Image (spheres, rainbow, N blue to C red):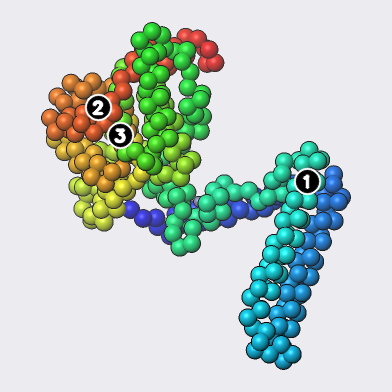
Amino acid sequence: MSLNKDQYDNIMADYARIRDRHRRELEKRRTQAYARIPALQKLEEQTPALAVDQLRRRLRSSAGSSGPGNGAGSIPGAPADRKDQKTSFRETAAQITARRIRLLTENGFPADYLEMKWDCPDCRDTGYIGREKCHCLKQREISVLYNQSRLETLAAGADFSLLSEKYYTGEDLDRFRNALRVCRIFVEQFDTVHRNLYLYGTVGTGKTMLSVCTAKALIEKGRSVLYFSAASLFDRLADCTFSSGSRDGLRGFLDDLYTCDLLIIDDLGTEFTNAFVASQLFTCISERELNRHSTIISTNLSLRELQARYSDRVFSRITSTYEICKITGKDIRLQRRRRGRYG
Ligand SMILES: [Zn+2]
């Protein structure tokens, strides 16, 4: 699927707002630093003059080297001169940078205090790297096209380091630790080892949060992640497949579904399952496997229930190509309610 003009313009306007915000913040930092370090302001003001001076000297010298007095005989020497000038220009720039950093750090500021910051350093908040769309723009497109608000809400407070062991004991704790370890490795080795995960177990044991933490870590690494609850995924597939006139929409959707870096299907088994759903699930996981794109499925269904509900071939594909993690325990939401919100 692709964005309409308004959606695209909104995203680009948002990038412009982000760049403006960073420019204003840099100005604020600069004012603050100059107020405390007058020598820094003096140095910054001299920097353009030094650069112009260097450039002037360079131009003068290259004009001289091709002048009549030098003749053709001077040409072989010219590149070496230019090289020397470049080197001296670089040395001057490096000295200025070193002095700026020294002034900042001596006065208690971080070394990069006057560096421009970006939300996405890869594209410098423009959405593009050269002519190619940056990963951050691709993720924004996904977010607009497929309403990823649930993932975004959950991801806001998600981090592997914040997942607590206090809700688990005994065998449940061992299983949770194992699942957490598997998810962390999944992220660490995402670019080198192709994996899929099947997180299953009783209700409210943290499967969704594990997959959301995984998604967040990968989005931060610049990978595209598409998240669906099983019900919304199959509803959308049915809408695109059976509504007239949405063939292009279906093609675009399937393209995104099959090729995003990570697909998360949350709560498999809570949708109304029928032959259409079973066949779409098989095609989806097969296509993704064919393209070597990773998928995480979280579900309350045991493997036996999976087989009974979706067919032998779905069962066979998942047990042969997915890492299976069982997570058990008491419902975390219930435990939280009993202990109070921050218990
Ligand atoms: Zn970017």
For disc 2, the neighbor class at 10 Å (few under 14, some 14 to 19, many from 20) is some
Of the numbered discs 1 and 2, the one sitting upstream in the chain is 1
Instruction: In this rendered view, identify the residue nearer to me: 70 or 216.
Output: 70
Quadrant of the rendered structure where residue 183 is? top left
- Specify the amino acid type for callout 3: Asn
For disc 3, the neighbor class at 10 Å (few under 14, some 14 to 19, many from 20) is many
The residue lying at 87 percent from left, 50 percent from top is 38
Which residue is denoted by mark 2 in the rendering?
269
Of the numbered discs 3 and 1, the one sitting upstream in the chain is 1
Quick check: 95 above or below 284? below
Quadrant of the rendered structure where residue 113 is? top right
User: Would you say 176 lies left or right of 119 here?
Assistant: left
Which residue is denoted by mark 3 in the rendering?
196
- The reply to whether the C-beta atoms of the residues labelled 1 and 2 are less than 8 Å apart is no
* Mark toward the viewer: 2 or 3: 3
Residue situated furthest bottom in the rendering:
68
**Label 2, label 3: how many angstroms apart (C-alpha)?**
18 Å
Residue situated furthest front in the rendering:
73
Would residue 284 be visible to someone looking at this image? no
Q: Is mark 3 within 8 Å of ligand 1?
A: no
SS assignment at label 3: loop
| Residue 180: mark | none
- The reply to whether the C-beta atoms of the residues labelled 2 and 3 are less than 8 Å apart is no
Quick check: 95 above or below 242? below
Which residue is denoted by mark 1 in the rendering?
102
SS assignment at label 1: helix
- Specify the amino acid type for callout 1: Arg
SS assignment at label 2: loop
Instruction: In this rendered view, identify the residue nearer to me: 38 or 9.
Output: 38
**Label 3, label 1: how many angstroms apart (C-alpha)?**
48 Å
Residue 49: x and y in percent read: 80, 66
